Image: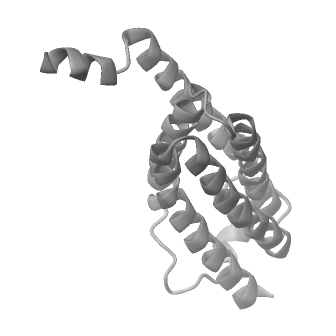
Amino acid sequence: MESLAIGRRLPDGSSILTAIGFVLLVNIVGAAPSAVASPDTPWFRALEKPWFYPPTIAFPVVWTLLFVLLGIALWLVWRSDADGRRLALGAFAAQMAFNVAWTPAFFALEAPLVALGIIVVLWALVVGTILAFRRVDRRAAALLVPYLAWVTFATVLNLGIWRLNA
């Protein structure tokens, strides 16, 4: 009897493939800006960085892990039939648009102040997305908390770079 209850809680093979699809999609969308802009430029290398600037390798590792969590969270909300699902999906799309906009603003436009404005809006949108996800699936909301922590850190980092180089 217990194995039957466990079987009902686990997603089937098709659902797992869909979840993997969501994870891949979020990673592809999230990584897309790096095709047009990156920190590997003379301009960025010349910038003074705050003392707490992490090693370069931290960024792709952290973002990949965060995008995996975002993909799983999005999948949980997408497959739900709870009230607020459409709002939660819209909130996710809005925050993702600002996430994607940050990299070109900072690196391609070489505009840390513009990027700071974008990331402040992103931070607010992530908070809103967490609240919207919470109404649909608490697990999905919890999966976004590390993302909010990283966006908070990235906001402070962006502010520090702007202040040191203004």
Identify which residue is drawn at 74% across, 35% down: 86
**Residue at 47% across, 49% down:** 143
Work out which residue is located at the far top of the displayed protein and give it: 14
x and y percentages locating residue 10 in the rendered image = 32, 22
Question: Which quadrant is home to the N terminus?
Answer: top left
Which residue is found at the position 64% from the left and 42% from the top? 30
Is residue 160 or residue 82 the one in the foreground?
Answer: 82
Q: Position of residue 121 (x, y in %)?
A: 78, 65
43 lies left or right of 25: right
| Quadrant, the C terminus | bottom right
Q: Relative to residue 135, is residue 101 drawn left or right? A: right
Residue 163: x and y in percent read 73, 89
> Taking 60 as reference, is 121 above or below it?
below
Whole-percent x, y for residue 96 in the image: 71, 46
User: Does residue 68 appear in this view?
Assistant: yes
Residue drawn at 76 percent across, 40 percent down = 90
- Camera sees residue 39: no
Q: Nearer the viewer, residue 37 or 156?
A: 156
Tell me which corner region of the image, top left, top right, bottom left or bottom right, holds residue 151. Answer: bottom right
**Along the line of sight, the residue nearer the viewer: 155 or 131:** 131
The image quadrant of residue 126 is bottom right
Colouring scheme, one of rainbow, by chain, secondary structure, one colour:
one colour
Quarter-wise, where is residue 79 in the image?
A: top right
